[in-house]
Image (tube, helix red, strand yellow):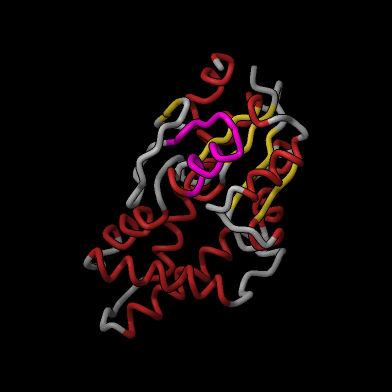
C-alpha cells in the first residue's frame, strides 16, 4: 500500500505532461512566429542555462513573472539570430493561461483528492520560488513540503534529490510513489532509490526508455490508480 507521494512540478503539475519546449512551440506558432525546431531548441536551452547560471529569480517571484523572464530571454536570443516581430506578451499570456487552466481543471482537483489520504511532497528542478508559485495557484495547502533543486543544491537526475524527498515524507521507498513526466529526470532516478513510479507520458522531448510501475496520460487518472498499488 502506498503511504506517500512525491511529484514533479514542471511538465507535470503545471502542464499535465507537456514538455515546456512543446508548450513554447505551440505558443510561437499561434503567434505567427515561424521557427525551425533547431532554433527554438537553442533559444529554449539558452534561456534555461542562463537562468541556471544567474540568480535572476527571486524567492517571491510568481510563476507568471518567471515565465516573463524566460520569454524575454528567448526573445533576445531569437532576435540575435534574425527573428523579428516577436510578440512576447502574447506568448507569455498563452503559456500562463494554459497553465492556469490546467491546474484549475486537472492538477488541483487530482491533488485535492489524493491529499485526503496521502501526504504529497514536491520534488522539482526549480529556481527557488516554488513556495510563491504554489501560493499563486492555491496549491500550498495541498503540498506537505518542497524539495527544490536550487534550494537543496541537488538537481535531477541525481537520485539524491529523491532521497531527500523520502526523508521529508518519512516513509520507506517501497511504500512511496514518485510521479513525473520525464523518464530520465523522474522515473529512472526515483527507481534507483527504490520508489514505485508512475510516468506521466504526454508530449515529451527526447525521452529515454524506462519501465515504470504504471503509465498515465493525465494526472486526472492518478487518484483512481494509487489505491491499486
Question: 185 or 204: nearer the eye?
Answer: 185
Would residue 192 be counted in the magenta stretch?
A: yes
Q: Is residue 191 above or below residue 184?
A: above
Q: Position of residue 213 (x, y in %)?
A: 47, 26
Specify whether 93 is left or right of 144. left
Question: 200 or 172: nearer the eye?
Answer: 172
Can you see residue 104? Answer: no
Question: 199 or 112: nearer the eye?
Answer: 199
Quarter of the image for residue 61 reads bottom right
The N terminus lies in quadrant: top right
Q: Position of residue 166 (x, y in %)?
A: 70, 38
Q: Is residue 82 above or below residue 170?
A: below
Specify whether 175 is left or right of 82. right
Say which residue appears at 67% left-offset and 60% top-offset.
Answer: 129
Say which residue appears at 56% left-offset and 44% top-offset.
Answer: 8
Q: Position of residue 47 (x, y in %)?
A: 45, 71
Would residue 210 be counted in the magenta stretch?
A: no
Specify whether 217 is left or right of 65. left
Q: Which residues are magenta?
A: 185-200
Say which residue appears at 41% left-offset and 32% top-offset.
Answer: 211
Amino acid at each position: 500500500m502506498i503511504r506517500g507521494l512525491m511529484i514533479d512540478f514542471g511538465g507535470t503539475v503545471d502542464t499535465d505532461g507537456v514538455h515546456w519546449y512543446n508548450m513554447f512551440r505551440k505558443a510561437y506558432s499561434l503567434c505567427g512566429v515561424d521557427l525551425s525546431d533547431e532554433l527554438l531548441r537553442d533559444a529554449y536551452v539558452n534561456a534555461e542555462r542562463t537562468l541556471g547560471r544567474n540568480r535572476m529569480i527571486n524567492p517571491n517571484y510568481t510563476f507568471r513573472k518567471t515565465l516573463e523572464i524566460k520569454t524575454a530571454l528567448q526573445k533576445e536570443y531569437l532576435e540575435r539570430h534574425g527573428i523579428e516581430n516577436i510578440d512576447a506578451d502574447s506568448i507569455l499570456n498563452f503559456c500562463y493561461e494554459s497553465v492556469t487552466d490546467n491546474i484549475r481543471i486537472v492538477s488541483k482537483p487530482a491533488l485535492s483528492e489524493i491529499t485526503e489520504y496521502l501526504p504529497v511532497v514536491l520534488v522539482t528542478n526549480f529556481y527557488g520560488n516554488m513556495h510563491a508559485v504554489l501560493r499563486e495557484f492555491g496549491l500550498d495547502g495541498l503540498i506537505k513540503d518542497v524539495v527544490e533543486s536550487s534550494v537543496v543544491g541537488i538537481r535531477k537526475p541525481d537520485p539524491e534529490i529523491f532521497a531527500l524527498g523520502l526523508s521529508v515524507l518519512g516513509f520507506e521507498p517501497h511504500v512511496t510513489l514518485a510521479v513525473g513526466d520525464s523518464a530520465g529526470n523522474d522515473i529512472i532516478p526515483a527507481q534507483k532509490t527504490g520508489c514505485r513510479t508512475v510516468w506521466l507520458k504526454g508530449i515529451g522531448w527526447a525521452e529515454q526508455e524506462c519501465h515504470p510501475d504504471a503509465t498515465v496520460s493525465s494526472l486526472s487518472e492518478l487518484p483512481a490508480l494509487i489505491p491499486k498499488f
